[in-house]
Image (tube, rainbow, N blue to C red):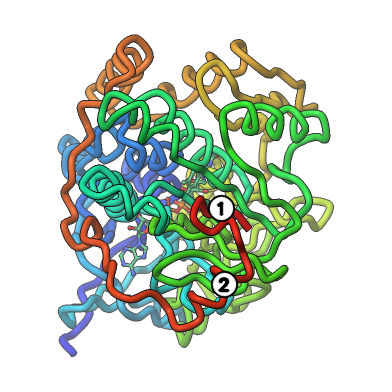
Amino acid sequence: MTQAASHEVVIVGAGFAGLNAARGLAARGVDVLLLDRNNYHQFQPLIYQVATSQIASKDVARPLRAIFRRDRRVRVVTAEVTAIDAKTRTVTTSDGLSYQGKVLVVAAGAEVNFFGIPGAAEHAFPLYSLDDAARLRSRFLGALDAADRDSRYIDRGALNVVVVGAGPTGVETAGAVAESMTGVVPSYLSPELARAGRVYLVDMLPEVLMPFSEKSRAYAAERLRAGGVELRLGASVTEVRKDGVKLKDGSFISSRTVVWAGGLKGRSLLAGSGLPQGKGGWVDVDPDLSVPGLEGVYALGDTANIVDGAGQRLPQLGSVAQQAGHHVVRNVLADLRGGRRAPFVYRDKGIMAMIGRGAAIAELGSKHRRFTGPPAFLAWLAVHVVLMSGIRERIGAVISWLWDYCTRTRPQIVVDRPDAYEIDWSEDGEDGEEDAAASPGRDRASA
Ligand SMILES: Cc1cc2nc3c(=O)[nH]c(=O)nc-3n(C[C@H](O)[C@H](O)[C@H](O)COP(=O)(O)OP(=O)(O)OC[C@H]3O[C@@H](n4cnc5c(N)ncnc54)[C@H](O)[C@@H]3O)c2cc1C
């Protein structure tokens, strides 16, 4: 390993947290080295719309060098960080280079948690990155094209999409896929094939959207059902196979497109870093976002276990990550230039979820005032446009939404991940026969 290059602040991860920290520090005259495995910042809340061809990849990804092109204080390095030594505030990348900061900010997000469910990591499609979205889109199109080539593939799950996890990501994805089935697939393939499409939303919990109020949850469930989503709640997934999903009650849903929105955990990168990992593998932090026992080390956003004044863990939201990124600037400056650190106080502006055309939920403000239907739908669109990074990206997304709304066609329906598009239709799992017998309706993926 070469000698570590030294910097004022090293930030790992250019998501909402890292990006805002870098911007704020540079604006106050601090030199920042910003590392990310991607050369772009991705806007995760709209990733499911990339997967369902509603908007283009370029609308949710903005090159980091474009973001910081006028900011000479931020040096962007595109590299995979493979090791963190929290004690020396040094990170090492896959090409063996090391970078040491007087201050180290870890904002590397989270990774998908498959909870050890057999086959899930192998066969399900997670939805956490732009690459995940492109792969899922290609798989969905691969399954549709297969059904179009030979209707026998329909009986083997080609037109069934199973979304595992009924939190906001799962609900938004299931709603968007169902809308594609009814609105887009008829013109892409044929109305007959579109009618054979089924969308399942599976969760072990008894309700959808647990972070929302009871009324919002009921509204979401009702709108999803009305949009054609079959809810399988209180149903645990026990196995994901290449030909479908097995549930704890013994039933089986055949599908070649299983979306995993089942949960997140702390990044495996953190293991061995010396960062204290609490529940779920998240990095425990003090109220000022510094890592206890480590001088000049901070953890933010989805990476961290940030608790509020009542000791409750703050949710993994873009708004928490953004605000933490803004806040850490003050504390890093205190470390570098002298001064007192301040505790992070999250300003809760509410939560939202999109279900489909004219159907959304918004619980706004610290009191979570509830809106549903078209007002929430418009509020969701407005908030996401404002939060997006870049004017071109905002215009691109709005044009795509208007186009989709008016024409029900999606120019983004393109296959760009041939590996995900190709489906292995060879002999299904050994116990496939058994399941077919146990589930008479397997032909149409019922359980
Ligand atoms: C599908 C989806 C929908 C969502 N919808 C909403 C929503 O509507 N509203 C909301 O508030 N929140 C939403 N969220 C949550 C929100 O997106 C996250 O809470 C937020 O992105 C967390 O920001 P972060 O900066 O902590 O991490 P991230 O945004 O995940 O950024 C982490 C960065 O670290 C980089 N990185 C990770 N590991 C390495 C490594 N080893 N080497 C180099 N770089 C690395 C990644 O490339 C990434 O750029 C959604 C999340 C998902 C997945």
**Foreground residue, 401 or 335?**
401
Name the amino acid type tagged 2: Asp
Q: Does the Cβ of the disc 1 residue fall within 8 Å of ligand 1?
A: no
- Determine if residue 301 is in view: no
Task: Judge from the rendering whether residue 91 lies leftward or rightward of residue 373; answer left or right.
Answer: left
Question: Is residue 422 visible to the viewer in this orientation of the structure?
Answer: yes
Quadrant housing the N terminus: bottom left
**Where is residue 132, by image quadrant?**
bottom left
Q: Report the residue marked by disc 1.
A: 339
Residue 2: percent from left, percent from top: 15, 86
Tell me, yes or no, whether the two marked residues, 2 and 1, touch with CB atoms within 8 Å: no
Q: Identify the residue at horizontal 34%, vertical 77% (top origin).
A: 90
Sequence-first disc among 2 and 1: 1
User: What is the x, y in percent for residue 134?
Assistant: 27, 49
- Are there few (<14), some (14-19), or many (20+) residues within 10 Å of tag 2? some
Q: Is residue 160 above or below residue 13?
A: above
User: Which residue is painted at 50% across and 42% down in the image?
Assistant: 198
Q: 271 or 87: nearer the eye?
A: 271
- At mark 1, the secondary structure is loop
Residue 28, quarter of picture: top left
Instruction: Look at 28% across and 21% down and name the residue there.
Output: 409
Provide residue 212's location: percent of width, then percent of height. Answer: 74, 37
204 or 77: nearer the viewer? 204
In the drawing, what numbered circle is on residue 435? 2
Viewer-side residue, 217 vs 438: 438
Horizontal side, residue 387 vs residue 64: left or right: right
For the point 15% across and 79% down, the residue is 95
Badge 2 element: helix
